[in-house]
């Protein structure tokens, strides 16, 4: 088959550094019999060592040329290929105890993380390569510049850790930015959680929608001054000062008032 030309619109930067690939696969610690899905296998840099360890895995790929290559290389007993858009994929159909991995296309990484957050219950863990800057936002603590909607919406469901950085030189073609590997493990079912996930998401979006405004302004639709008092939260603060637990308390207070 002719050499594949990387497609920018599909965020294609293929891993080419064997030692980086080995490090990622070691961090994932795949065991035979586990159910694993890789988002965007591409030319199979991670797929090959993972299939070797697991015996069988699932992949989701959008690029028809790459799908043709994968079909040529692997038997259906080794690889179940789901052709299409990971953003529309029903991950619950593969669970329970699903492991998700991927060197994610950077152009869709944030919406993909939000999509995946909806499947946390059926997931054991996720390991992703992302732009370092996105990983910093995911794991950021309150009152830091990186803390925002993405941090709160993911930290409410996952324990997350940045494992190691990967330089642009590990890819072909080279991306402009440094990448990081992040591990995401769903929090236990008995964790503090919002009663109404959709309401929680609306409140977090409002609080971070206008970062320079105070909570009294951004959450006007949801809370009055007496509500802030009942919650022991200062309405003169900005959204970035509140913890994930504060946002859960706010959402549950609003939910009970309704
Ligand atoms: N895993 C390979 C590697 O590490 O070399 C390729 C990684 S490349 C950054 C991203 C891959 O995701 C490409 O194979 C691309 O075609 C695929 N992709 C892009 N958008 C996608 C989408 N919406 N759904 C599924 N796969 C997608």
Image (cartoon, rainbow, N blue to C red):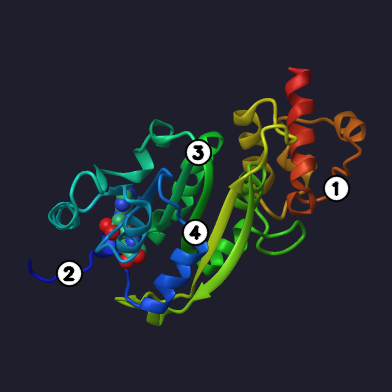
Q: Which residue is nearer to you in this view: 117 or 15?
A: 15
Rounded to the nearest angstrom, the CA distance separating label 3 from label 4 is: 15 Å
What residue lies at 32% left-to-right and 76% top-to-bottom? 16
Earlier residue among tags 2 and 4: 2
Are discs 4 and 1 less than 8 Å apart at CB? no
Q: Which mark is residue 29?
A: 4
Mark with earlier residue (3, 4): 4
Residue at x-position 73% and y-position 63%: 144
Distance from the alpha carbon under mark 2 to that under mark 1: 53 Å
- For residue 236, which numbered disc appears in the image? 1
Location of residue 32 with respect to 134 vertically, above or below: above
Q: Which mark is residue 5?
A: 2
| Numbered circle sitting on residue 97 | 3
Q: x and y percent of residue 53 in the render?
A: 37, 57
Q: Is residue 181 left or right of residue 94?
A: right
For the N terminus, the quadrant is bottom left
Circle 4: is it few (<14), some (14-19), or many (20+) Cα within 10 Å?
few
Label 3, secondary structure: give it: loop
Q: Secondary structure at mark 1?
A: loop
Q: Which mark is residue 199?
A: none
């Amino acid at each position: 088959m002719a050499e594949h030309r990387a497609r920018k619109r599909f965020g294609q930067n293929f891993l080419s550094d064997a030692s980086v690939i080995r490090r990622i696969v070691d961090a994932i610690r795949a065991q035979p019999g586990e159910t694993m899905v890789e988002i965007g296998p591409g030319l199979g840099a991670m797929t090959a060592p993972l299939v070797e360890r697991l015996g069988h895995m699932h992949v989701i790929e959008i690029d028809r040329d790459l799908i043709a290559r994968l079909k040529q290389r692997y038997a259906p007993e080794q690889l179940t290929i789901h052709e299409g858009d990971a953003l529309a994929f029903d991950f619950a159909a593969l669970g329970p105890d699903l492991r998700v991995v991927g060197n994610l296309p950077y152009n869709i990484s944030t919406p993909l993380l939000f999509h995946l957050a909806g499947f946390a219950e059926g997931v054991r863990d996720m390991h992703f390569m992302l732009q370092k800057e996105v990983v910093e936002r995911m794991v950021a603590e309150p009152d830091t510049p990186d803390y925002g909607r993405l941090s709160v919406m993911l930290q409410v469901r996952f324990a997350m850790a940045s494992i190691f950085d990967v330089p642009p030189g590990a890819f072909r073609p080279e991306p402009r930015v440094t990448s990081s590997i992040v591990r995401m493990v769903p929090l236990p079912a008995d964790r503090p959680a919002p009663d109404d996930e959709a309401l929680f998401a609306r409140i977090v979006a409002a609080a971070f929608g206008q970062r320079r405004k105070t909570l009294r302004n951004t959450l006007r639709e949801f809370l009055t001054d007496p509500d802030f008092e009942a919650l022991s939260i200062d309405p003169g603060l900005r959204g970035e000062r509140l913890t994930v637990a504060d946002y859960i308390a706010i959402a549950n207070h609003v939910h009970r008032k309704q």
